[in-house]
Image (spheres, helix red, strand yellow):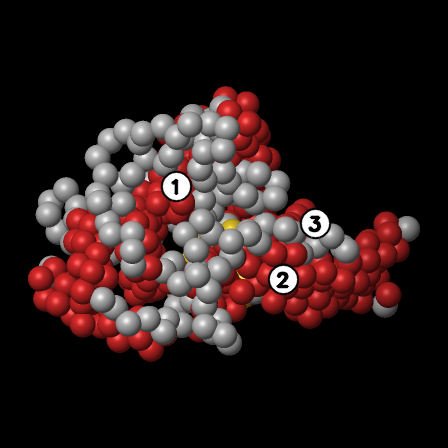
Amino acid sequence: MAETNAPATLESLKKEKRRLNNHLIAPNLIILVISLIAAASLLLSSLFGLNVHVDRQFVAAVTDFMEENGIGGTETENGSGMTQTQTIAYILKDIDVDISVELQPGDIINVARSGSRESLRALIENSVPDLDALVDTVSEQTAPALMGYAMMQTVSELPEGVVPEDIDTTVFNETIRLIGEQDPVAAKTEFMDTSETFARDQLGLELTESDKETISEYFDKAVELMKDEEGNYSVSNLLTSVLQKLKEEGIVFPGGDPEGEVPSGPSEDTPEEEPSGPSVDIPEETPVAAGMSLLEKQKPAAVSRAAASDQNEAADGEDEIDLLISVLEDPASIVDEMDESTIEIVRYVCLGISALLLLCAGCWAILAFFALLHILLPNKKVGMWYVKMTAFLPFFIFLLVPTLALLLGPQLIPAFPAQLASLSIKFAGMTYVSALCLLALWIISIFWCHPVKKRIKQCKQEISLLKRRGER
């Protein structure tokens, strides 16, 4: 009786095993789709993204950090009693932009493969695709403050209780709009009218006729700086020109004297040399006239031999501003400043990142292949351990770690700048897609595949046991 019942029981177990294997077709199809999505996201979408919202709060945090570290605490050369950090805060007081950087896997792999300057330039250009639009936006937002900046230099001391970044320069918005409409004549008329209001209400000055003539000359020079090669006017052209003047005026000198001071004139023991090149005569009897010299293209007076070493130190700061100007015009120009050893280091970094991406994407691709293969085979169980061991790495390295470092850095690392945690900095990238795919894979594995596989294993054990009994 046992011998007649054994074949029937064995056959039923085999049918049950086939039935259970068929139950794995649906999860295998889902695993196939998930794996393809994860692999594609790692190779075809953004790997790492950084978004920084720059507004008044951001600028305040940066200037606070500068002051805490003894940077930019000295007064600018043109008067007004404003420190360098106050000048920065004033010029950027109306800024409100989002700066985004994205790294694409394809560009990183190209740098790792070739290691050429051209591939690195492509990486940078593709990482900041909207820089021209960003420069235009920043220029438009800072232009009113720049319009009022020269008059800010005319007062030896700001009125009591006046905070530089709280000075209202919106009166110049209409001037900027007219310039954008390619109407410099109407813009000048508007500017001259609003200058009196600005000087009186914000700076406590009454403009004389001489002051107005000087302001008119200033405006003509500023508009000329806004003209491009095609004769069109744009405030974005003014930004790089002002950066150049800030360098010449010593307002931004990160590489200069440790105390932040830059020699501005000859010593008593050194005779003054005549400046070379053209100059513009501006009346010196009015305070406004002195401030209008910001945009004058005059070569600074020679400094004393005793200050020559300080000038050599300050040259580093000038080079940094020159680099900033070139980067605003062409972000990839920073590659031209790199030596071969730096290029090689960047290539090795890209090589490591590429290896990680190809490893993780390859594991997902292998899982997709086996999921498809086992759908066609009698044994439909798919091993997933290699994906579970590697798939979390891109998300962990490029998104989770930077985010946690920004949030927990001030608490864990004493030297970590506390201001960074308060800034509107967000890390992004599509690595979260593969992380979500991994999460879905775990859920399918635990709650769907594992129970079925467990029952298949029991069937196999029972079949094996019955076969052994049948052999005996």
Secondary structure category for the residue under label 1 = helix
Residue lying at the far top of the rendered structure? 340
Q: Position of residue 226 (x, y in %)?
A: 20, 51
- Badge 2 or badge 1: first in the primary sequence: 1
Q: Quadrant of residue 335?
A: top left
Residue at image position (77%, 55%) is: 414
- Badge 2 or badge 3: first in the primary sequence: 3
The crowd level at tag 3 (other Cα within 10 Å; few <14, some 14-19, many 20+) is few
Residue at image position (74%, 52%) is: 415
Residue at image position (33%, 55%) is: 291
Is residue 428 visible in the rendered image? The answer is no
Q: How many marks?
A: 3
- Which callout, 2 or 1, points to the residue nearer the camera? 1
Residue type (three-letter) at the residue carrying disc 1: Glu
Secondary structure category for the residue under label 3 = helix
Residue type (three-letter) at the residue carrying disc 3: Met
Q: CA distance from mark 2 to mark 1?
A: 30 Å
Residue type (three-letter) at the residue carrying disc 2: Gln
Viewer-nearest residue: 282 or 186: 282
The residue that disc 3 covers is 389
Q: Position of residue 74 (x, y in %)?
A: 55, 52
Is residue 118 visible in the rendered image? The answer is yes
The residue that disc 2 covers is 419
The crowd level at tag 2 (other Cα within 10 Å; few <14, some 14-19, many 20+) is some
